[in-house]
Amino acid sequence: MEMSGGNLGGTGGIQASLGGRYALALFELAEQGRSIDTVEASLLAVRDALAQSAEFRDLTTSPVVARGAAVKAVLAVADQLGVDATTRNFLGVLAENRRLGQLSQIIRAFRQLASRHRGETTAEVTSAHPLTDDQVAALKQQLRQRVGRDVSVDLSVDPALLGGLVVRIGSQMIDSSIRTRLNALASAMKG
């Protein structure tokens, strides 16, 4: 099934941003190399490294890191993470073009493209605490029943929610967070 940027249905929103254009370019490379799942797994490893390492995050966002140093450092991190060759080369290009600051956006857009390619819907799920594998499986099942197709989840944690979940599927948002409930209660009490 050949999909190129011109006929990949529904990518208008993704292509509109710079990060989206980079993600689409990476997706097309991964598709040609039949390595979409491999590249996605590598990008998830990079995303986790960004979340866990302040040094790596600083490397990707600091304007004072020289271009050559950024390329060397990001390739060293890629080797340490064991990412595939396509993702490694892509990270080098981002560093060379001073676009590492777009990395989180690129990863999110790539995952959306990969999900669409597999016929899935992507749900962005924010929870107050990390979800267990069982909780994620139960959530996927509930979302599958709600939207009528497989759903991949992009998980993030926001302790400010206090509890509950915020789930966004496209433009639809399901907010069961305790913070939102408390705000609604406070508004109702003000009358």
Image (spheres, rainbow, N blue to C red):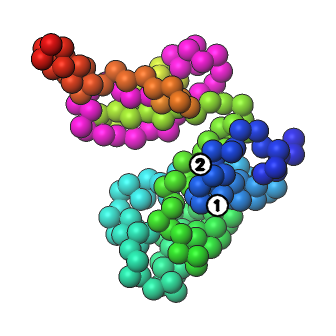
Q: Quadrant of residue 170?
A: top right
**Residue furthest front in the image:** 191
Residue 44's spot in the image, x, y percent? Answer: 53, 51
Residue type of the residue flagged with mark 1: Tyr
Quadrant in which the N terminus is drawn: top right
Q: CA distance from mark 2 to mark 1?
A: 9 Å
Q: Which mark is residue 22?
A: 1
Q: Residue at x 62, y 73 (%)?
A: 93
Q: Quadrant of residue 91?
A: bottom right
Q: Is residue 167 shown above or below 69?
A: above
Q: In this orientation, which residue lies closer to the viewer: 170 or 152?
A: 170
Along the horizontal axis of the image, is 3 left or right of 143?
right
- Secondary structure beneath label 1: helix
Q: Residue at x 27, y 25 (%)?
A: 180
Q: Which mark is residue 109?
A: 2
Q: Residues within 10 Å of mark 2 (few under 14, many from 20)?
A: many
Residue 13's spot in the image, x, y percent? Answer: 63, 44
Q: Residue at x 71, y 38 (%)?
A: 10
Residue range (magenta) = 141-167
Q: Would you say residue 158 sits in the magenta stretch?
A: yes
Quadrant in which the C terminus is drawn: top left
Residue 105's spot in the image, x, y percent? Answer: 52, 53
Mark 2 vs 1: CB contact within 8 A: yes
Residue 181's spot in the image, x, y percent? Answer: 25, 20
Q: In this orientation, which residue lies closer to the viewer: 86 or 179?
A: 179
Along the horizontal axis of the image, is 102 left or right of 120?
left
